[in-house]
Amino acid sequence: MCRYPTLFHLIILLCGCVPTIPKEALMLNSESLALRQAQTRRFETTNEKVLLHAGAAVL
């Protein structure tokens, strides 16, 4: 049947311990939009080199 019954049982046990995601975890609250807008930056250029340089400067 199975050459490694202990491993098989361990895998079955671990699969049963997977937590489910609560519904409210995927819902955005009213503060998330304000936080996202505060973290967003826009650059007035299409030059990719300038954008990469600005991103590297942040890091």
Image: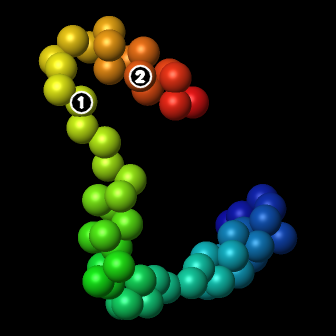
| Residue 19 spot, x, y in % from top left | 57, 84
Write down the residue under mark 2: 54
* Image position of 34 with respect to 38: above or below: below
Distance between the Cα atoms at labels 2 and 1? 9 Å
Of the pair 1 and 7, the residue shown nearer to us: 7
The amino acid type, in three-letter code, at marker 2 is Ala
| Residue 34 spot, x, y in % from top left | 31, 70
Of the pair 28 and 22, the residue shown nearer to us: 28
Q: Decide if residue 4 is in sight here.
A: yes
* Image position of 53 with respect to 34: above or below: above
**Callout 1 secondary element:** loop
| Residue 56 spot, x, y in % from top left | 50, 22
Write down the residue under mark 1: 43
Q: Is residue 1 left or right of residue 40?
A: right
Which of the 4 quarters of the picture holds residue 55?
Answer: top left
Circles 2, 1 touching at the beta carbon (< 8 Å): yes
The amino acid type, in three-letter code, at marker 1 is Phe
Which label belongs to residue 3?
Answer: none
Dividing the image into 4 quarters, which one contains the N terminus? bottom right
> How many dots with numbers?
2
* Image position of 9 with respect to 48: above or below: below
